[in-house]
Amino acid sequence: MMKKGGINMENLAYTEPPRVERIEGKTYLMSPRPRGQHNRASLNIAFLFERYLRGKTCMAFGDGTDVFLDDENWYIPDAMIVCDRSIIRNDGIHGAPDLVVEVLSPSTAKNDRGAKMRHYAEAGVKEYWLVTPQQKLVEVYYNADGHFEIDETYTIYEDWELRQMSDEERAAAKTEIPVSLYDDFLVSLEDIFLDVDAFQ
């Protein structure tokens, strides 16, 4: 039995209530600790959002903040932006954020692309990002009358991929994601995936 400072380390995981999401009335137990690449990407995104939004009306939130869309659906996004401060409460966000980010993992991808995506759109989320850290890929969706439509897929190209491109293709390769909430809000792909490769 390992102890540190009088704390039984074997029981440390049980000192906080479990993280749960409710999807269409069914409760799902979430992993208390996302894997390294997942955690790094979500942390980077929340930091980039916070850095830009500091002092503005909209607020950035990282992993761990509950979103209550309705009685049957409450989620814990990996990052989000909320512009309507009246829906912010101490226990979470009561209503639709303006932008939601879900970092995909094998255990969550089905719901992130399915039921959760649908309910976010129906609730009025304006912009939805699906992030795949292993592929350094970001899919950006915009809300179109209650459903999401893909706007653009962004990826970091390896050097060998860039060498195989024409000059026109290289020039067209996008390295920043424009956030629709502000005209000058750009997020660098390199910054999103900074140090993700440290986790193998």
Image (cartoon, helix red, strand yellow):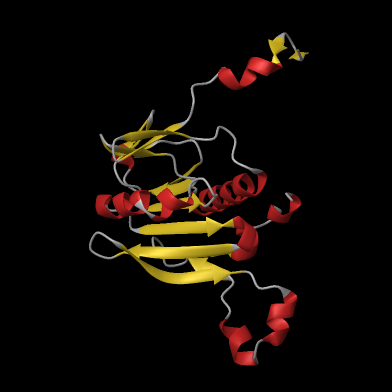
Image quadrant occupied by the N terminus: top right
Is 160 drawn above or below residue 119 in the view shown? below
Say which residue appears at 72% left-offset and 8% top-offset.
6
The total number of labels drawn is 0
Q: Which sits in the foreground, 71 or 92?
A: 71
Q: Judge left or right: residue 78 versus residue 33.
A: left
Percent from the top left, x then y, of residue 26?
A: 33, 35
Which residue is nearer to you in this view: 39 or 50? 39
135 or 176, which is in the foreground?
A: 135
Query: Residue 187: x, y in percent?
Result: 54, 62
Point out the residue furthest to the left here: 145
Q: Quadrant of residue 92?
A: top left
Which residue: 63% across, 58% down? 134
**Residue 186 visible in the snapshot:** no
Which residue is at the front of the view, 27 or 83? 27
Name which quarter of the figure residue 34 lies in: top right
Position of 117 relative to 30 (above/below):
below
- In this rendering, the answer to whether 76 lies above or below 169 is above
